[in-house]
Structures are given as C-alpha cells and as structure tokens.
Image (spheres, helix red, strand yellow):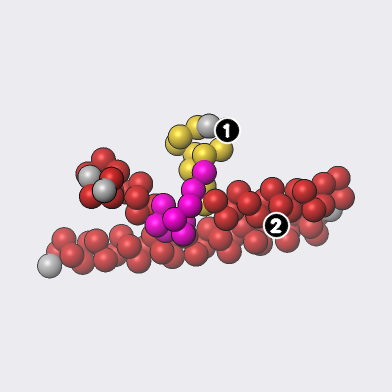
Amino acid sequence: MLKQTKEYKDFAGYVDDCGGNVRTVNGDTEEWIPEEAYTTAHDFRKKYGQELTPELVNVVLSDLNKIWKESIRKQMTRVKNQWKEEVN
C-alpha cells in the first residue's frame, strides 16, 4: 500500500530494484543498501577474517559490483518506464 503513496513511491522502487530487500548501515536511514550486498560482504568477512589479501579484496569488490550493477540496471529500466508513461 505504501508503494502507491507519493512519499514512498521512489523508495519502494529502490527496494524493488534491490530484489525486495534492503538494510541500513549503522542505523542511518539515508544509507540503504541491497540486502544481498550486505550479506555478501559479511559472509566474505566471516569466511576469510584475518586472511584478507589484495586478491581476496578484489573478489569481494567484484561480487559487490555485480550486485550494484544489477540494481542500477533495474532502476534505469524502472525510471525509463516511468518517464515513458508520463510522456504518453
């Protein structure tokens, strides 16, 4: 129901772009991230802990980049469709 309100429409779209799940970082409500990115980073930390090497950091950055690229792709599609509807 909140998706239909003016105040939450953009945020609801962002949540959809992130696969339906987001989290805040440090409780800051302005810092929403895809749940998948949060989980990926923390799973990586649990798995490798103190063994982090530059190569391993590159792996996690690559994984996070894939998540954000997909989120941005969905966002661009959603915004493009919104503008098409508005123009029509």
Number of dots carrying numbers: 2
> 1 or 41, which lies in front?
1
Q: Gap in Å between the C-alphas at discs 2 and 1?
A: 20 Å
Q: Is residue 6 above or below residue 19?
A: above
Q: Which residue is mark 1?
A: 26
Disc on the earlier residue, 2 or 1: 1
The residue under label 1 is which amino acid type? Asn
Magenta range is 15-23
The residue depicted at 44 percent of the width and 55 percent of the height is 20
Report helix, strand or loop for mark 2. helix
The answer to whether 10 appears left or right of 85 in the picture is right
In the image, residue 50 lies at what x, y percent? 86, 45
Q: Quadrant of the C terminus?
A: bottom left
In the image, residue 37 lies at what x, y percent? 59, 53
The residue under label 2 is which amino acid type? Val
Q: Is residue 37 above or below residue 8?
A: below
Q: Which residue is mark 2?
A: 60
